[in-house]
C-alpha cells in the first residue's frame, strides 16, 4: 500500500463523510425511500420543464404567428418613421421649393431617358 499525502484522500471516504455530514445537519437521517422520493420529485420537475420546452419548439403555428407579429410591429415603426420624415421634408419643401422642383425635374429626365432607350 502506498503512503497518501494530505491531498490524496480516498474519494469513497470523502463521500461517506459528506453523507454523514448531510444526515447530521438535517436533524434526522433521511431514509433511502425519502431520498428516492426527493429524486423522483426533482426528476418530474425537470421532465416537466423539458416537455414544455419541446412543446413550445414543436408548436410551429404559434412560433410563426409570433414572428409575424414581431415583423408587423417593426413595419409599423418604420412606417411611422417614414411618415414623420416625409412630413418634415414637406415642410422644408414649402419653405424652399427650388430643390424640390430640381429633384422632380431630374427624376422626370431619368424616366424620359429610360423610355427613349427602351424603344
Image (cartoon, rainbow, N blue to C red):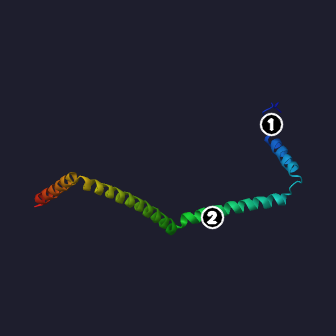
**Residue occupying the point 78% across, 34% down:** 8
Which type of secondary structure does the marked residue at label 2 adopt?
helix
Q: Position of residue 19 (x, y in %)?
A: 83, 48
Could you tell whether 95 is left or right of 29 in the image?
A: left
Q: In the image, what residue occupies the spot 83% across and 42% down?
A: 13
Horizontally, is 101 left or right of 67 in the view?
left
Camera-side mark, 2 or 1: 2
Residue 38: quarter of image? bottom right
Residue in front for this viewpoint, 76 or 9: 76
Query: Image quadrant of residue 87?
Result: bottom left
* Residue bearing the label numbered 1: 9
- Which residue does the numbered mark 2 point to in the structure image? 51
Q: Choose between 91 and 13: the one closer to the eye.
A: 91
Residue 46, position as x, y percentages in the image: 68, 60
| Residue neighbourhood size for the residue with mark 2, other residues' Cα within 10 Å, grouped as few (<14), some (14–19), many (≥20) | few
- Tag 1's secondary structure? loop
Callouts 2 and 1 close, C-beta under 8 Å: no
Q: Identify the residue at the far right of this view.
A: 28
Question: Can you tell which mark lies on residue 108?
Answer: none
Along the horizontal axis of the image, is 109 left or right of 49?
Answer: left
Amino acid at each position: 500500500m502506498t503512503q497518501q499525502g494530505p491531498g490524496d484522500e480516498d474519494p469513497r471516504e470523502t463521500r461517506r463523510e459528506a453523507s454523514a455530514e448531510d444526515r447530521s445537519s438535517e436533524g434526522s437521517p433521511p431514509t433511502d425511500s425519502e431520498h428516492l422520493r426527493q429524486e423522483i420529485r426533482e426528476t418530474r420537475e425537470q421532465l416537466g420543464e423539458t416537455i414544455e420546452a419541446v412543446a413550445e419548439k414543436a408548436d410551429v403555428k404559434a412560433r410563426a404567428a409570433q414572428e409575424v407579429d414581431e415583423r408587423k410591429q417593426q413595419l409599423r415603426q418604420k412606417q411611422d418613421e417614414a411618415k414623420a420624415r416625409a412630413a418634415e421634408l414637406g415642410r422644408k419643401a414649402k419653405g424652399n421649393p427650388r430643390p424640390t422642383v430640381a429633384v422632380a425635374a431630374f427624376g422626370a429626365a431619368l424616366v424620359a431617358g429610360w423610355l427613349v432607350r427602351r424603344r
